[in-house]
Amino acid sequence: MERCKILVVDDESRMRKLVKDFLEKKDFQVLEAANGEEAVDIFYEDKDIELIILDVMMPKMDGWEVCREIRKNSKVPIIMLTARGDERDELLGFELGVDEYISKPFSPKILVARVEAILRRSGVADASDVISAGGIVMDKAAHQVSVDGQVVDLSFKEFELLEYFLENQGIALSREKILNSVWNYDYFGDARTIDTHVKKLRSKIGDKGDYIKTVWGMGYKFQCPGPGEK
């Protein structure tokens, strides 16, 4: 079986080597780019890249510009690396379609674990792995969601969030529990990260967004209406 190909983009050669070494130990094939322009060129030349690890601060094109360019044509998963701790950067990343946001310094083992988790979500699953509720149908194998028969365009993180809600229907879920379960590894974020994603998810699934109930002071609960309810 052909190895999964990952593009690592960082202007620091030491950082690229560190990430590459850990990924190759897990049998990933790693391509490297030292700046944003090089990253875009490599991405368009090689059609088999399945995930991008992208630094924010780089010469020629920064990470935001690279992300914007790639998102014009591709939904390939993107993990953004940054030395900044500003949550505004984090929210901008999610608005641009970044799937994960990891601040430097970070544990390479945790980065690799996140890579594996994202690829599991986007990879081949059991063809019967379908969840449905109230007109929402999630096909994990195809990584596709439809609402009343219409396919809905979700980011990877929105897909993971909806999957978590569907698998925990009727259960009140705290924001902390959602962060730890969907973002994993005691993600250092705050409520706005979840609230931003929930808002976008509700908008994308239309009137089914009402199924995602706000539990005030706690978090959220996914609940379809019972018989005779609307």
Image (cartoon, helix red, strand yellow):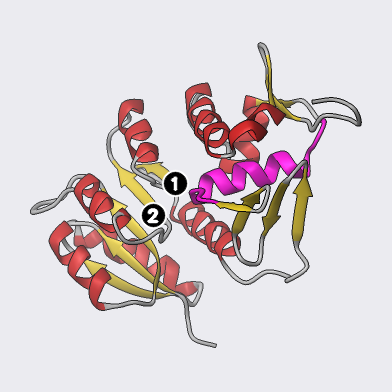
Q: Nearer the viewer, residue 188 or 196?
A: 196
- Which residue sits at x=60%, y=52%? 150
Query: Looking at the picture, which amino acid does disc 2 mark?
Result: Ile
Q: Residues within 10 Å of mark 2 (few under 14, many from 20)?
A: many
Q: Position of residue 2 (x, y in %)?
A: 49, 86
- Marks 2,1: beta carbons within 8 A: yes
SS under mark 2: strand
| Spatial separation of the CA atoms under disc 2 and disc 1 | 7 Å
Residue 89 in view: yes
Q: Which residue is at the far bottom?
A: 1
Chief secondary structure of the magenta span? helix
- Which residue sits at x=32%, y=27%? 88
Q: Which residues are magenta?
A: 152-170
- Which residue sits at x=21%, y=64%? 39
Q: Which residue is mark 2?
A: 78
Q: Earlier in the sequence, mark 2 or mark 1?
A: 2
> Magenta stretch containing residue 154, yes or no?
yes
| 214 horizontally vs 114: left or right | right
Q: Quadrant of the image for the C terminus?
A: top right
| 165 horizontally vs 200: left or right | right
Q: Quadrant of the image for the N terminus?
A: bottom right
Q: Position of residue 35 (x, y in %)?
A: 15, 59
| 52 horizontally vs 148: left or right | left
Q: Nearer the viewer, residue 162 or 57?
A: 162
| 140 horizontally vs 71: left or right | right
Residue 184 in view: no
Which quadrant holds residue 209?
top right
Q: Position of residue 23 (x, y in %)?
A: 43, 68
Residue 32 numbered mark, or none: none
Q: Which residue is mark 1?
A: 100
Which quadrant holds residue 181?
top right
